[in-house]
Each structure stands twice: as C-alpha cells, then as structure tokens.
Amino acid sequence: MTERQKRLLTGPILQTLLGLAGPTIVVLLVQTGVGIAETYFVSNLGTDALAGVAIVFPALMLMQMMSNGGIGGGVSSAIARALGGGRKADADALVLNSVVVAVVLGLVFMAAEFLGGAALFHHVVGQGGALDAALAYGNVVFAGSILIWLTSLLAAALRGSGNVMVPALVTLTGAIIVVPLSPALIFGWGPLPRMGVAGAGAAVLVYYFAATVALLAYLRWGGSELRLRFDLRLVRWRGLRDILSVGGLSAISTVQMNLTVALITGMVGRFGADAVAGYGVASRLDYILIPLTFGLGSAGLTMVGLHVGHGDFARARRIAWTGAALATVVTEVIGLAAATFPHRWLGLFSGDPAVLATGAQYFRTVAPFYGFLGLGMMLYFCGQGAGRVFWPVIGGLARLAIAGIGGWLIVAQFGLGLPSLFASVAAASTAYGGITAIAALLGPWRPEPLASPQAERVSASSKRDNRAA
C-alpha cells in the first residue's frame, strides 16, 4: 500500500475528502465551463442549432455519465477495494480489463447512434433545421465513442488508486484545447473549414483522442502506481465481474437518470423549439451539479472502497455521511440562487422571450430541490465504493417513474402545461434523494465475499493488525 493510500485510511475525514475531491472538482468545473462556452458559440448559429444540440445532449450525457460514474464507478470501486485489501496484482489486472470493457461499450454506443439516432431525434423534434443540427452534431460526437469510454475508464482506474492529479491535468489540458478549437471549427477561422454545429462535436473528439493517448502512455510507461500490461491472460471473468457487479447496476442508474432527462426533453418538445431551447439552456445548470457531486462522490468512492477493502466499515459510513451533508448544502445553495435570479444564467445564452420564459419557469419550480439530488448522488457514489448500489438504483427508478412516466401522463394524457411537468421533475428529485438516504441510513454495509484465497489471507492479516492497534 502506498503512502497516499495510507493517508486516505488514517487522515481526518473532511479534510482528506476535500483534498481528494478538490482537483477533480476544479478541473471538471473548467470542463463544464467549456460546455457552457460551446453552448454560447452554438447559440450564435440560431435557435435551430441550439435546439439540435439540446436534443443530442441527453444521449451524450448518458454515455459520459455511464462511462464516468456508472461503469467508471465500478472500475474505481474494484481497484480501490483491491488496493485496500493489499491485492496490487489484481488492481493492475483490472486496468486491462477496463480497457476491454471500454472498447466493447464504445462500439455499442457508436452503433446505436448511427443506427437509431435519426429516428430518435426525429421523434423528439420532427423535421426541420433542429433535426438537421442534431444529426450533424450527434454523428460526429458518437463517432468517437471508443475514445470517450477509454478516457473515462482509464481516469476512473487512476482515481480508484487515489491518483486524482493526472486525470485532472488531462482534463484541464483538454479544456485549453477545446475552448479555442470549438469556435474555430464552428465558424471556420483561418485555414480551418466552417463546419457549423458539427465543428463543436469535432473539437470534442480532438480532446478525447489526446486524452486517451496521454492516459495510455502514463499507465504503460509513466510513473503510475497502477500498471497497464497488455497481456490477454489478465482478462478474466473475475476481473470483469469485479467491475461489472458494481458498474452494471450503476450503469442502470445512469440510464435511468438520462432517460428521465430524455423523456422530459421529449415532452417539452411538444411545446415547440423555443421551449426545447429554453429547457435545454436551463437544464445545463443541472449538469453543473455533476462536476461537484462527481468530484466529491469519486473522492468518497475511493475512500469508502479503500476502507471496505481494509475492513473498516464504521469509518466508511462516516465518510459517506460527511460527504452527503457537504453535497446537500452545496447543491441547495446553487439551486436557490438559480430560482432567485434565473435570468443571470439564461441571459448568457439567449434573449428570446419565449426561451427565457421556459427556462425561468423551470428554475423556479425545480432548482429549489437540487439539494435532494446532491444528497442522493453522493450516497450513490459512496455506495459504489462499498459495492452497495441496489437502493440508489431503486431511487433512480422512482425518479424515472415520477418525472419521466408521470411527466408523459401530465402532458400527453391530461393535456397540462409546462408548470405541471416541471412540478413532477421537482417531486422526482425529492423522491430520489429521500429513498437513497433512508436506505443508506437503515441498511448497514456488510463485507463482500472475498474474491480469492490471497484476499482472505490479506483480510485476516488486516483484522489482526486492527485488533493489535
């Protein structure tokens, strides 16, 4: 066990959590700022382009969230628990297993968009300029699905070992690349062609290509504590199971979350392109919560996973609840600010009164309940570290039922308007956070079955050390 991992096991909880989360939060906020800048650049192409990107955005976020917080969470959890139990060789083997998973799932997402993207986008927005923009942007972005998955899972592997600086530096470098490149490709600066909305997607792919190369090189030839060894004998069902037993259920949770957003987007689409654009701009703020909760959550995941692997379940639970309290406060403050001053955000992207009206209605109805999202998401990440994600998935199912299915009934069956639809979204957030918190409070974590005789010996040794201490 490295000195870094020993500090994570023994340091003050809040200070250690913030120290581990800080680099990830800062750099992911920068990355979110890049997404906001991209939205601003695209908005200069008109409402159709803005609506087209908003239509693709839930599908893209599904892939990014599944690769980072879903399957990526399974990678981080498996590696953290292996290292916490002293199984360094298993942790190294898990890196190669992660690469295999990334390539397979990247191919799946690429094929899904190319085969079904046109039908999906047409169902949401019908014909016209918005559909053309959605296809132009989506086809380019999803062509690089394998790169997105590789970047996400390799970064997750490093975070699982407690190394947050290298993934953070890679992301920061990507932000430096994308900010000037995106408008250059959109508007055709200098010798670069004018690609329109497709240029925004091309800039994203350039970043993910560079990030994949950097992470592969670091894990293969750099100074990483984890080592990537290209030995196919290391690809075994046990390693894949360690990743997918947590990552599979976590992936279901991300599907639920993004399916909820997609269904809401589809219902908003019934009120026209202006309404979709307004909702898309407003819901972008929802995704600012993701870097915050992901930074805190990935830190909590790593710390909880190390402690679970080490056998210290009581301290693992204290870490989870400390992080949950912090995430709730931060996200609730953001939500109250958005509800009080909605046009401070919306005015950055549009001056259209119809777009502003939809966005403001969304903020005033939904944003005051952001704290429940922060609570639920933090406990979800910590549950990943402990290998316990069943109840967060149930919370996500409740959210999907209330906001997605309930929203469809509100609009399609009962003919009610946007205020009622957004009220169902607020109720769904409350249910998600509440169910996840109650389950975490009432359901104590138990030790997972050990994966190997070596792990049993290490666990027994750790327990003897703990008793001696």
Image (cartoon, rainbow, N blue to C red):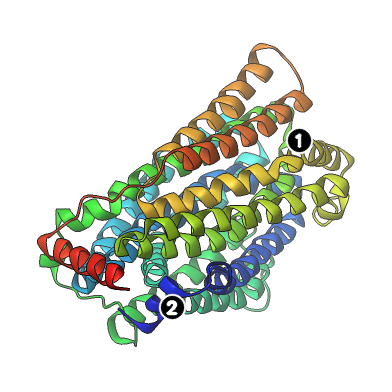
Residue 448 lies, in percent from the top left, at 26, 50
User: What amino acid is labelled 2 in the image?
Assistant: Arg
Please name the residue that numbered disc 2 is placed on. 7
357, 198: nearer the viewer: 357
Residue 85 lies left or right of residue 279; in this view the side is left
Q: Image height check: is 153 above or below 337?
A: below
Name the quadrant of the N terminus. bottom left
- Does residue 91 appear in this view? yes
Task: Tell me the residue at 29%/62% (across/down).
Answer: 98
In the displayed structure, does residue 322 sit left or right of residue 2? right
Could you tell me residue 5's position as x and y percent?
38, 76
Residue identified by numbered label 1:
275
Quadrant housing residue 215: bottom left
Q: How many numbered circles are shown?
A: 2
Report x, y in % for residue 49.
Answer: 69, 49
At horizontal 78% and vertical 41% (from top left) the residue drawn is 363
At label 1, counting other C-alpha atoms closer than 10 Å, the crowd grade (few under 14, some 14-19, many 20 or more) is many
Q: Position of residue 306 (x, y in %)?
A: 36, 65
Q: Quadrant of residue 194?
A: bottom right
The residue shown at (80%, 48%) is 336
Disc 1 + disc 2, Cβ < 8 Å: no
Q: Is residue 261 visible?
A: no
Type of amino acid under label 1: Ala
Name the residue nearer the viewer: 350 or 334. Answer: 334
Q: Is residue 423 left or right of residue 90?
A: right
Q: Callout 2: 10 Å neighbours few (<14), some, many (20+)?
A: few
Task: Please indicate whether residue 178 sits to the left or right of residue 94 in the image.
Answer: right
The correct choice, above or below, for 261 with respect to 1 in the image is: above
Tag 2's secondary structure?
helix
**What distance separates the C-alpha of mark 1 from that of mark 2?**
50 Å
Q: Earlier in the sequence, mark 1 or mark 2?
A: 2
